[in-house]
Image: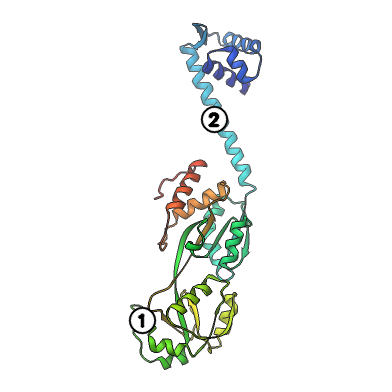
């Protein structure tokens, strides 16, 4: 028996008509008639009876029908799994990353994905937040892991991973002239009017307006009346930090575990925050790789700040359902 014969039997049972089954299967009616007669002859069983001109399965015919349906479902499941393996073997993912901490981002985010897709080819492109945003919009990269500002990036699904405070950094020898400042719960000083006046006399080195940190720093400085002299600005964080290590310049920088030695860090009176996360275009063509990215984002046990999961949960769960990925354990 060939697989197509299972389809013949199921179609005859479904339509109750040799002529309609012949039309759907695109085979001649005599072919189906000979097939059915031969099958019943080999089994020595009557599988159909004619009732009001329709072919209706007998009790034995219904048993055969159930077996045929299960065999056909198993065959289709096998084809689907083979197709999935074929696609998985040739998957590619282009990821935009920060030139400073992109390596850490990839190391933290990608292992679960690589476990699922061991042959996944990952290519990375470095750039500033705004450069990567444009690459996402143009479709030149699939996802990006970097700083973001959701108010100016409405066409992205954003999953927050990290909240970083923007700080004012002053070289320790110069900071000694500030005297005693009000301190926050973490022991660091808080800018006051005296500190703001003093800092406005210093030369500053920090990231330029091509970066999200640079733009955020400019807005925060204006809002708090800070007007330092600008000695140097650049979009490369490593270049900026190399100059700052000379110990002669102030700066605006995100508070991280890699704070520069020899600098005193101060809070803005009104805290200013930067956010980083995984960014995926809402208009991205759905595929299984993106579906699994959403799965791992939803699965991550992180205290993301200001996390807006309405869109990503909706889209993520739609994709998970589309590709048959279990949502058990996901919130």
Badge 2 crowding class, 10 Å Cα cut-off, few under 14, some 14 to 19, many 20 or more, is few
Percent x, y of residue 156: 52, 56
Closest to the observer, 322 or 68? 322
Asked whether the viewer can see residue 76, the reply is yes
Above or below: residue 88 compared with residue 258: above
Q: Which residue in the protein does label 1 denote?
A: 187
Closest to the observer, 306 or 36? 306
Above or below: residue 318 compared with residue 173: above
**Helix, strand or loop for disc 2:** helix
Name the colour scheme: rainbow
Asked whether the viewer can see residue 258, the reply is no
Choose the circle earlier in sequence order: 2 or 1.
Answer: 2
Above or below: residue 284 compared with residue 9: below
Percent x, y of residue 261: 49, 83
Residue at the (58%, 34%) spot, across then down: 78
Query: Residue 159's mark?
Result: none
Percent x, y of residue 210: 58, 72
Q: Which residue in the protein does label 2 denote?
A: 74
Residue at the (43%, 77%) spot, across then down: 223
Q: Quadrant of the N terminus?
A: top right
Residue at the (55%, 52%) spot, across then down: 115
Residue 6's image quarter?
A: top right
Q: Comparing marks 2 and 1, which lies closer to the viewer?
A: 1
Left or right, 149 with reference to 98: left
Closest to the observer, 275 or 241? 275
**Helix, strand or loop for disc 1:** loop
For marks 2 and 1, give the CA distance: 65 Å
Q: Mark 2–mark 1 contact, CB under 8 Å?
A: no
């Amino acid at each position: 028996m060939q697989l197509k014969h299972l389809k013949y039997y199921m179609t005859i049972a479904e339509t109750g008509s040799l002529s309609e089954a012949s039309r759907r299967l695109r085979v001649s009616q005599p072919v189906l008639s000979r097939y059915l007669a031969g099958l019943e002859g080999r089994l020595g069983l009557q599988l159909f009876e004619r009732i009001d001109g329709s072919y209706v399965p007998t009790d034995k015919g219904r048993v055969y029908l159930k077996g045929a349906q299960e065999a056909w479902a198993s065959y289709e499941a096998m084809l689907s799994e083979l197709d999935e393996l074929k696609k998985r073997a040739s998957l590619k993912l282009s990821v935009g990353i920060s030139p400073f901490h992109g390596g850490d981002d990839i190391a933290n985010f990608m292992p679960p994905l690589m476990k699922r897709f061991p042959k996944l080819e990952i290519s990375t492109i470095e750039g500033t937040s705004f450069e990567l945003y444009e690459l996402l919009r143009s479709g030149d990269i699939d996802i990006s892991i970097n700083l973001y500002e959701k108010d100016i990036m409405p066409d992205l699904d954003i999953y927050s991973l990290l909240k970083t405070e923007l700080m004012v950094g002053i070289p320790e020898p110069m900071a000694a002239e500030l005297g005693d400042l009000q301190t926050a719960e973490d022991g660091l000083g808080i800018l006051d009017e005296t500190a703001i006046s003093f800092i406005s006399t210093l030369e500053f080195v920090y990231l330029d307006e091509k970066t999200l940190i640079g733009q955020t720093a400019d807005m925060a400085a204006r809002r708090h009346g800070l007007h330092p002299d600008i000695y140097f600005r650049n979009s490369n964080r490593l270049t900026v930090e190399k100059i700052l290590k000379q110990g002669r310049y102030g700066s605006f920088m995100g508070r991280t575990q890699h704070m520069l030695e020899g600098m005193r860090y101060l809070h803005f009176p009104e805290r200013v925050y930067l956010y980083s996360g995984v960014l995926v275009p809402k208009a991205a063509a759905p595929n299984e790789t993106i579906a699994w990215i959403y799965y791992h984002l939803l699965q991550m046990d992180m205290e993301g700040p200001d996390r807006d999961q309405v869109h990503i949960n909706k889209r993520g769960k739609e994709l998970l359902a589309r590709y048959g990925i279990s949502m058990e354990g996901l919130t």
